[in-house]
Image (cartoon, grey):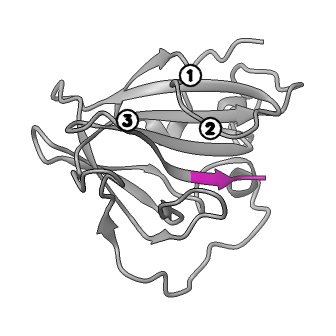
């Protein structure tokens, strides 16, 4: 099955299908799609802003709240993912939006060199039986928005280290 369009959470970006990055990304249980993100100004690098916490197997913290990308070229900021609005559970209102204190919003820094500018790839995972296309009713979410897993992957502009910046289950 082929994904016909990218999820709506990427609407503010120029999105291009891409290959899986050459780095350890964990297990892949369903259909996985990767998209490189560019800014509408043609900028290709972003500063990643969010709330960060320790990850269960990575040696660096990952984003867990709304994730904003700020273009390094034009400084335009756009949300690329918010767990209270995007993904399977949020689209189907399976849980209420969290209203808890999340800590301090900060920029992700490269674990190797501390640079904050990255080329970005977003990964979306869907169940193996997912059918893509337009919803039949306006109130039904598009299948592209019913992803069960979201990952944000960044390649450091300075040292080229590929890092997982967000690793979020959505169902």
Earlier in the chain: of badge 2 and badge 1, it is 1
Cβ atoms at labels 2 and 1 below 8 Å apart: yes
Q: Secondary structure at mark 1?
A: loop
Numbered circles on residues, count: 3
- Disc 2 on helix, strand or loop? loop
Q: Which residue is mark 1?
A: 20
Q: Position of residue 168 (x, y in %)?
A: 63, 54
For the residues bearing labels 3 and 1, Cβ distance under 8 angstroms? no
The dot on residue 120 is 3
Residue 47, percent across and down?
A: 25, 50
Q: Is residue 14 left or right of residue 158?
A: right
Name the residue that disc number 2 marks: 25
Quarter in which the N terminus is drawn: top right
Q: Main secondary structure of the magenta part?
A: strand
Instruction: Look at 62% across and 24% down and name the residue there.
Output: 33
Could you give the CA–CA distance between mark 3 and mark 1, rounded to whole angstroms?
12 Å
Residues in magenta, as a range: 167-171
- Give the residue displayed 75% in from the left and 55% down from the top: 89
Q: Nearer the viewer, residue 164 or 51?
A: 164
CA gap between label 2 and label 1 equals 9 Å
Asked if residue 30 is among those painted magenta in the image, a careful observer would answer no
Q: Nearest the camera: 132 or 80? A: 80
């Amino acid at each position: 099955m082929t994904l016909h369009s990218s999820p709506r959470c990427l609407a503010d970006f120029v999105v291009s299908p891409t290959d899986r990055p050459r780095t350890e990304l964990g297990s892949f249980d369903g259909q996985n799609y990767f998209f490189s993100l560019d800014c509408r100004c043609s900028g290709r690098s972003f500063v990643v802003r969010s709330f960060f916490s320790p990850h269960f197997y990575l040696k660096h913290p990952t984003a867990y709240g709304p994730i904003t990308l700020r273009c390094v070229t034009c400084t335009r900021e756009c949300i690329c993912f918010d767990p209270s609005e995007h993904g399977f559970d949020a689209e189907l209102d399976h849980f209420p939006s969290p209203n808890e204190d999340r800590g301090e919003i900060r920029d992700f820094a490269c674990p190797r060199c501390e640079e904050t500018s990255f080329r970005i790839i977003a990964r979306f995972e869907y169940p193996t039986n997912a059918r893509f296309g337009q919803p039949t009713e306006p109130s039904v979410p598009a299948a592209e928005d019913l992803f069960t897993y979201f990952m944000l992957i960044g390649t450091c502009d300075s040292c080229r280290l590929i890092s997982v910046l967000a690793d979020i289950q959505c169902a």
